Structures are given as structure tokens and as C-alpha cells.
Image: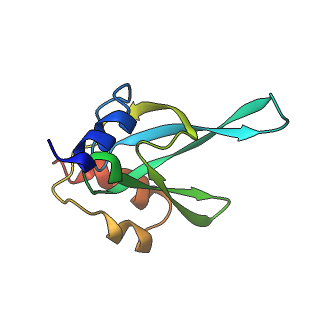
Amino acid sequence: MNKIKLVEAQFTKKDHPVFGVGDTVKVFTRIPEGPDKFRLHPFEGVVISKEGSGIREHFTIRKVSYGEGIERVFPLNSPAIDKIEVVRLGKVKRAKLYYLRNKFGKRATKIASAEAK
């Protein structure tokens, strides 16, 4: 077998839930606060893209905080991610939801469910 695939299989996490573009997820990241202490920091938003495969897979989450849009890219197999929770499923017809960058307020949050109609 290919050596790269062996290394990828060793570092790939299998315990994350299945989610897709348009879903609202909450990602808990580990923030170190001391030599043996850490806290979990949640980041909740809509998944606007998923890219890559295997160990290189990553996804982008967008949320609006105090009127300012924030996007964050998470590697799926990162050791900094403690857990991922799927808050709400979305039904979309696109692979990338970059058009949400131009929407704000209710239009940005209802878009994922409105496309399903």
C-alpha cells in the first residue's frame, strides 16, 4: 500500500458526525490555558464549503457576530477540535454558499432553508 495512505489512515479521526454544506454546526475547539488545563470554545455557524479528502479535508463556517461576518476554516482532522455538533440540517442546491457573504440579517439565516422550497 502507498506510504502516504498509511500515514493518512493513522491520523484520520473517525468520530466526527456527518454534515454537509448548508448545515448549522457548533465546533468546540480546545484552548490551552495552562500546562495541563484547557477550555472548550464553541464556534457556531453555517457551513459554506467543504473541500479536500482524507487527512486534508477542511470546512469553512460563517457566522455573523455583532453585525460583522466572521468566517473560519477548520481542518476536519485537527487535534484542536474536541467535538462537532450538528445543530440544524440545511437543504441547499449548491456546493459552495459564498453568496451568503452578501446577505445579512434574516436573509442570511433563512437562505439555507428557503432554497429547499
Check the image and report above or below for 85 versus 95: above
Q: Position of residue 102 (x, y in %)?
A: 42, 74
Q: Position of residue 65 (x, y in %)?
A: 63, 57
Q: Quadrant of the N terminus?
A: top left
| Residue at x 43% of width, y 71% of height | 101
| Residue at x 80% of width, y 29% of height | 37
Q: To which quarter of the image does residue 87 belong?
A: top left
Colour scheme of this structure image? rainbow
Question: On the rendered structure, is 88 left or right of 80?
Answer: left
Question: On the rendered structure, is 91 left or right of 41?
Answer: left
Q: To which quarter of the image does residue 95 belong?
A: bottom left
Q: Position of residue 13 (x, y in %)?
A: 38, 32
Check the image and report above or below for 43 versus 88: below
Q: Nearer the viewer, residue 86 or 74?
A: 74
| Residue at x 34% of width, y 69% of height | 98
Q: Nearer the viewer, residue 29 or 48?
A: 29
